[in-house]
Image (cartoon, grey):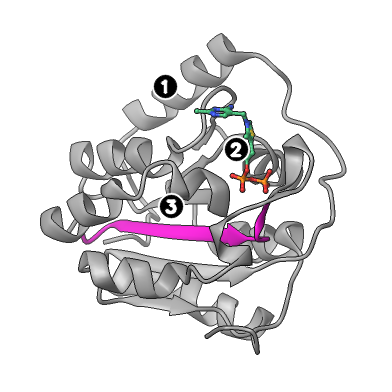
Amino acid sequence: MNSHLKRMSRFDLTCRLVEQLKHDEAVIGGIGNSNFDLWNAGPRPQNFYMLGSMGLAVPIALGVALAQPERRVFALEGDGSLLMQLGALATIANLKPRNLAIMVWDNAMYQITGAQPTASAGRADFVAIARGAGLEQSAWAADEEDFTALVARSLSEDGPWFVAAKIDGSAPKGQTPREPAIIKDRFTRAMAQKPGDGYGGL
Ligand SMILES: Cc1ncc(C[n+]2csc(CCOP(=O)(O)OP(=O)(O)O)c2C)c(N)n1
């Protein structure tokens, strides 16, 4: 099991990811805390903030990765939200988008709606699930340094990647402004810019 893993801060890990981005990488933040901490790590037009439904960060990221194979794409998703859409992992394993990386924040609860326990508070192990779906490059981040190293690998080596991190119960400091039309417009305009000069992606 994974009880030995360090519980980390979602915001700290999100900052570690964002700091390693070069410019054009797309980052899709899942509903609630996942996209709030992505916003708090520093707004970028290449970020998409999912405001309404659980389970959509990974499918949206898959769509972007397939549409733009030259762009690196990250999905940041909470454990409860990933559980809503586990089938996406099997789809991704079969499609093998080499530019896609999935980061799962496992706090073992539906934190934002009142900390109800998720299946990973019991026996579910997300890395075992991802491997079983066919995602071979799947790993738990043991600590912050390990997470940083896994992000570096997911930026430089072919995916698809699946990285899960045990996180603590700290709440985001602020929330993403509730401006869905602006978020969509800004993101689609950013995606219309092809990865260009200085892009250190694929
Ligand atoms: C399809 C769907 N079901 C239920 C909700 C209500 N809801 C919004 S966020 C949330 C919990 C999200 O849990 P998780 O993804 O683990 O993130 P956390 O809050 O723990 O950061 C729930 C139940 C929703 N928005 N969409």
Q: Secondary structure at mark 1?
A: helix
Q: Residue at x 22, y 61 (%)?
A: 98
Q: Estimate how packed mark 3 is, as few (under 14), some (14 to 19) or many (20 or more) residues with alpha carbons within 10 Å.
A: many
**Prevalent SS, magenta region:** strand
How many numbered marks have been drawn onto this rendered protein structure?
3
For residue 189, the mark is 1
Q: Tell me: 170 left or right of 1.
A: right
Q: Residue at x 27, y 45 (%)?
A: 65
Residue 88 in view (yes/no):
yes
Q: Which residues are magenta?
A: 98-109
The reply to whether the C-beta atoms of the residues labelled 2 and 1 are less than 8 Å apart is: no
The image shows residue 11 at horizontal and vertical percentages of: 75, 57
Q: Residue at x 60, y 59 (%)?
A: 105
The image shows residue 90 at horizontal and vertical percentages of: 21, 55
Q: Amino acid at mark 2?
A: Arg
For residue 44, the mark is 2
Which tag, 3 or 1, sits closer to the chain's start?
3
Pointer 3: what residue? Answer: 74
